[in-house]
Image (cartoon, helix red, strand yellow):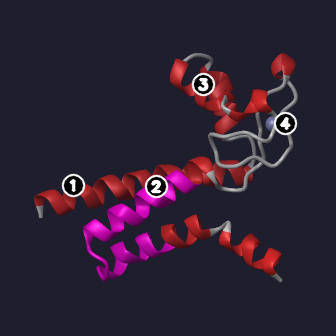
Amino acid sequence: MAKKKNELWRYWGIAAFIIAIAGWLTADIGPVGIAVLSAFSFLWFLFQAPVPCGALNRGDVEQCRNNGRGVLRGCHIRHHQWQKLKALVLRRRWRQISSELFPNATTALASMGAILALASSVTGLVQSLTG
Ligand SMILES: [Zn+2]
């Protein structure tokens, strides 16, 4: 029972994301609330979303199929954990980055969610500053 609850709790970032998007449609929350919710959801997509690891193994052919945590973090294999973030920061091997951020449907959705959440957060912030 407790395990089941934990399983659901892992998806809180999606809930925050949906509430934030609903906030834009209904104007119930206000831009500050939306910006905060979106920012949390953005971090969730990057560092907690349950997506496949997807780190490229030796030879750039096989992608790791372990469960990862977040779009940017890999699985429990130490070598995989920050591989994607490193590739992103060092700005090299764009082909590898794109194939690691969009290797399959789950991760591609999470990546797109992260991008939307970031856009929503920035928009909310700008609106709260200018409005
Ligand atoms: Zn891995």
* Direction from residue 20 to residue 105 in the image, left or right: right
- Disc 4 designates what residue? 64
Q: Position of residue 88 (x, y in %)?
A: 56, 27
- Disc 2 designates what residue? 116
- Disc 3 designates what residue? 86
Magenta-span inclusion, residue 117: no
Q: Amino acid at mark 2?
A: Leu
Q: Tell me which label, 3 or 4, sits earlier in the chain.
A: 4
Marks 2, 1: nearer the viewer:
1
Disc 1 Cβ-to-ligand 1 distance below 8 Å: no
Q: CA distance from mark 1 to mark 4?
A: 39 Å
- Secondary structure beneath dot 3 equals helix
Magenta-span inclusion, residue 25: yes
Q: Amino acid at mark 4?
A: Cys
Q: Tell me which label, 2 or 4, sits earlier in the chain.
A: 4
Vertical side of 49 occupied by 62: above or below: above
Q: For ligand 1, give the image quadrant.
A: top right
**Residues marked 1 and 4 touching at CB (< 8 Å):** no
Vertical side of 16 occupied by 111: above or below: above
* Direction from residue 53 to residue 62 in the image, left or right: right
The magenta-colored residue range is 18-44
* Residue visible at 62% across and 40% down in the picture: 72
- Secondary structure beneath dot 1 equals helix
Q: Tell me which label, 2 or 3, sits earlier in the chain.
A: 3
